[in-house]
Structures are given as structure tokens and as C-alpha cells.
Amino acid sequence: MTFDDAFAHVPPTEAAELAARVRGPVLLPGDEGYEAECRVYNLNVALEPALAVGAADAADVQAAVRFAARDGRPVTVKTTGHQQVTPARGGVLISTRRMKGIAVDTGRRRAQVEAGVIWQEVIDQAAAVGLAPLSGSAPLVGVAGYTLGGGLSPVLGRSLGYAADHVRSLEVVTADGELRHVTADSDPELWWALLGGKGNFGVVTALEFDLFPLTHFYGGGIHFPGERLTDVLHTWRTWQSDMPQEMSSSLAVQRLPPLPELPEPVRGAFVVHVRIAHLGPAAEGERLIAPLRAAAPTLIDTVSEMPYTALGAIHLDPPTPMPYYDRTTMLRAFPAEAADKLIELLGPGTNSPLASVEIRMLGGALDREPALPNAVSSRGLPFVLFGFGVGAPDQAELLRGTLDEVMNAMEPWADKRRMVNFLSTEEATDPERLSEAYGAERHRRLTAAKKTYDPTNMFRVNHNIPPG
């Protein structure tokens, strides 16, 4: 049993000493507030650290890192906890959700945000001055974790690239407990590794990034009956190949739960959900998506001009925590044979237990290297395929097996590289798969940076890149 697996307790006296040095709460298992501090989005991944620190500022983060270093404890970091992959037993959890500072610089079109900020908070403040960030499909996720994994915007990504491509500076507490102001000029190797390397190189306490002039766009979703999957998927497959980079889209095969908040036509239904975001005039957007609307009868069509503040309505990602299992792969191509294989596994009559399997079109600016290079590994791949099934551990075998069957069926068109933010728990904790996700050359460079900035692998309770 490793140190991380053994539940190594922190003596109350030591916790009290740390509590005297920080502004936020310091909590041991059993303390009031401990469970709330450790709560994550995937209910199948329970955090059980030896100590939880609710950091109020960067100084609290420094104190927590130095405390962990003294005993050789691992450190994990979370805001909303959407991408926790291991329980963090024996470790120190730094929760950043109290660090809520946001400053929007209208003249420079930039935002400076602290580590506990979620995207909707930035979206709302930026919208007040006619600007928008490169936020993702789920506006309730944390800015920091999303950006460190690359950050795929369903509206602006194909036109502007990854969110990581537009970061201008980072405030980072490294494993030595020092707070560093990191730019591409000041620390080029640490800069490169942080943006795409997830949480391996320190605790990011603040980020500065670009905003863009945008208040509205033409977008939303079209729900089709699942029985028409063949017509819709093949139409979408050929349609997307000829779209300008101002058009973004994804398609999800979904078996929705019978929740009262879902409208009657799709509540508890088997559906195909086509998502749309177009940056040009609404009339042009309508012209471009006409072939999709004609593919089959629709259940619900919400595509229209919409405010950027409502972008969460495109994908309708579940806002509340739930137990689930997921898998991902990236595709070099999506020919008719690949679409037919998905229809065979997910279509009418299969009774698939999966809640959703989606394919997102990439390309455009997502393929271009940014002016300030970073470690994002998925450039040049035109599609990401992501699936999940909702269920507690007693359904793990069924859901994992079905997800593996779908992803394995895509192997003829798949690439070993992955989009790090989409990795499942099993994928993110498998050293070989994580190495493949980055590619050999990029992974070697990341391990070298890890050896420089985190030689003891303090930040290992994550998508871990061990020191080279």
C-alpha cells in the first residue's frame, strides 16, 4: 500500500498550527464542513484527503503547500471538482472556491480572475461591457482547471483556438511554496507546461486572459427522435465537412432521464441532439443549418439568436453532481463506416445504457499553433468523441464495458492523442494512456519540466505526469 492509499491522518495539533497561519478553514475528517469542502461533481469519485484547506487567498495556498511539503504529502486542488480522478487519501486538499476576485479591463479586453471563479461569473461581468471569454459548454465549471487542460469553447474555439492560447499571465504557487508571476517571457518552460499540463506544476491562484467583442450569436439545439439517428447522423457527418470556422457544432445520441425539468417531448426519450453556434448573421446561420433541419422531423428546435450569457443552453450539460462513468477518444476522420458503427451500437433497438455519446467537430483555429506556444496536445485532430453513462458503482461493469465497446469500435479512425480535459478517471490515472494522450515528444518535455518544478511529484493527485 502506498502512502497515498493509506489514510495517513494529520494530528489535530498540526492542523491547529496550520489554521493559525491561514485565513480560510482547515478541516479534518469528521469536522463540520469537511464533506462540503471535499464534494466533487462525479459522485463516484469521493475525495478523502487527510486535511482540507479552504484557501481564502494566495498566501493560504502557499501555507498549505509548505505544510504538505514538510511531511511529503500529495496536494490536490479543486474549485468545482469536475475533474477529480483519485480520492487523495493521505493528502492535502486545497479548495479555491473562496477566491472569487474578477477584474475586467475593458480597454485591453482582458480579465484577471482568481482560482475559485467559475465561467458564468466571468461571462456575466464581461457581457456587461460587450465582451466574452473562451468559456466551455458548461458555464458552471471552474476557469482555472478548464484552461490548464486547454479549454474547448463550443462557440469561439473554431475561430480563435483553445482558451489556453489566449492566457497572458498566471500566478502560480509551485512545490517549493513560492508564489510566481509566470509569463511566456519570464518562465517559458513553466509557462508552456502549465497550459495543457493540467495541475502538475503548481497551484494556479490567478489567471489573466483575453476577452473578445461578442454579446450575441446564432445558436442553440435541435432535438430529433432517436429513431431517425441514421438520417441525422449521416446528414451531420457530410454537412460539417463544408462549414466555415465561424460555425461550430456537435451531435449527441442521448437517452434522457425522465426528469420533470425536461420538456415533455424529450423527457425520458431517446433523442439525437444537434448543437449549433454560428458567429455570423442569423440569416446566414439559418441558411447554413437548413440541411440539418430537413434531415428529419424535429422534437424541439431552439436555434435562434441568443445572448452569450446563455451559452449553457447549447449543450444543456447537467448542472448538478451525479454518479457517472465516461470515456473519450479522438478521431482522425469520421467516414460513413464510422457513423454506421455508432448507429449499430447506439441506435434504435440497442437499448444502450449510456446517457450520451457525442461527437464534436474541431478544426479551424483549434489546429493552429498559438503565438505563445503551450502543451495542448490535440491540434490537427478533427473530432473528439465523448461518452458517459450515469450509474453508481454497482453498474460500473456494465457502463465501463459498454463505453469500451463504443470507443474500441472507433479504433480504425482513432488517434492515441487525447484532449486532456475529456479524459476519464481510468484514462487519466493510467501512465501509459496519459503519455499517449500527449504524444511521446510532448510528454518527454512535460516530464522534464516536472522534474524541474515538482521533483518530488507533490502534485500527483491528478492527470499525473511523473518527474523525468
Image (cartoon, grey):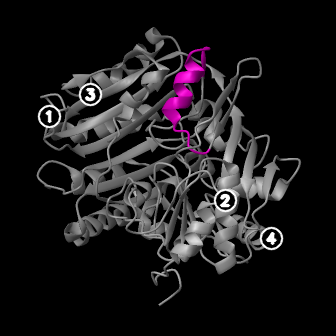
Residue nearest the observer in this picture, 38 or 263: 38
Circle 3 sits on which residue?
Answer: 295
For disc 1, the neighbor class at 10 Å (few under 14, some 14 to 19, many from 20) is few
Range shown magenta = 115-131
The answer to whether residue 462 shows anywhere in this view is no
Q: How far apart are the two marked residues, 1 and 4, measured between alpha carbons?
A: 52 Å
Residue nearest the observer in this picture, 238 or 113: 113
For disc 3, the neighbor class at 10 Å (few under 14, some 14 to 19, many from 20) is some
Circle 4 sits on which residue?
Answer: 452
Residue nearest the observer in this picture, 344 or 202: 202
For disc 4, the neighbor class at 10 Å (few under 14, some 14 to 19, many from 20) is some
Residue 323 pos. (x, y %): 28, 58
Residue at figure coordinates x 68%, y 43% from the top left: 206
Residue at figure coordinates x 59%, y 73% from the top left: 14
Kind of element beneath mark 3: loop
Indicate which disc, 2 or 3, sits on the residue closer to the N terminus: 2
Q: Is residue 391 magenta?
A: no
Residue type at mark 4 is Thr
* Camera-nearest label, 2 or 4: 2
**Which mark, residue 180?**
none
